[in-house]
Image (spheres, rainbow, N blue to C red):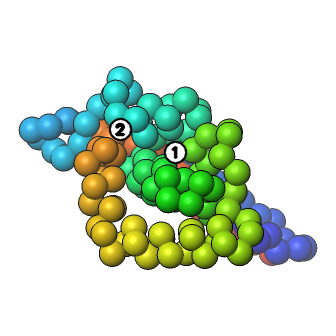
Amino acid sequence: INVKSGSTSNIAINKIFTSNLPKPYSNCEKVENSNLIYVKRLFELNTSYNHVNCIDLCYQQFIIDSCGCYDLDVMRLDDTTLPCLNRSQFKCYRDNLMKFVEMNKNFECSKLCPFSCDSVDLELTTSYSG
């Protein structure tokens, strides 16, 4: 958030709750009691569930399985795996990122990552005077 000096700034954050009916009325599921591995892991990490975070964990598992290290740009899956830091690990990560896309792994991950029926979004509004 950028604030101008010498002026009055107002910052408002609105919390927007959305709740949809589950299948068959929409393409979402109640995820709170899910047994799907990545859904459970997000709750264990005390991270709010959303489809994108779940896909990220699935991708991270693919990189760990392929390279033995994790991608620093994505949420960490566990506390035991080390990040991809040296050249060979970085090359492995980069090559497997391309494989993830080429093999359409995103689609496979989507099967393990349902859309949640409940979501919370934050809306930021700023105004200035003076």
For disc 2, the neighbor class at 10 Å (few under 14, some 14 to 19, many from 20) is some
Residue at image coords 33%, 53%: 109
Residue at image coords 56%, 39%: 47
Helix, strand, or loop for circle 1? strand
Specify whether 34 is left or right of 75: left
Report the front residue among 96 and 53: 96
x, y percent for residue 122: 53, 51
Q: What whole-number distance in Å separates the C-alpha atoms at marks 1 and 2? A: 13 Å
Q: Which residue is mark 2?
A: 118
Q: Identify the disc placed on residue 15.
A: 1
x, y percent for residue 36: 34, 34
- Split into 4 quadrants, where in the image is the C terminus? bottom right
For disc 1, the neighbor class at 10 Å (few under 14, some 14 to 19, many from 20) is few
The amino acid type found where label 1 is placed reads Lys
Report the front residue among 25 and 114: 114
Helix, strand, or loop for circle 2? strand
Looking at marks 1 and 2 on the same chain, the residue that comes earlier in the sequence is marked by 1
x, y percent for residue 115: 30, 46
Residue at image coords 30%, 69%: 103
- Residue 34 position (above or below residue 53): above
Residue 113 visible in image = yes
Specify whether 71 is left or right of 8: left
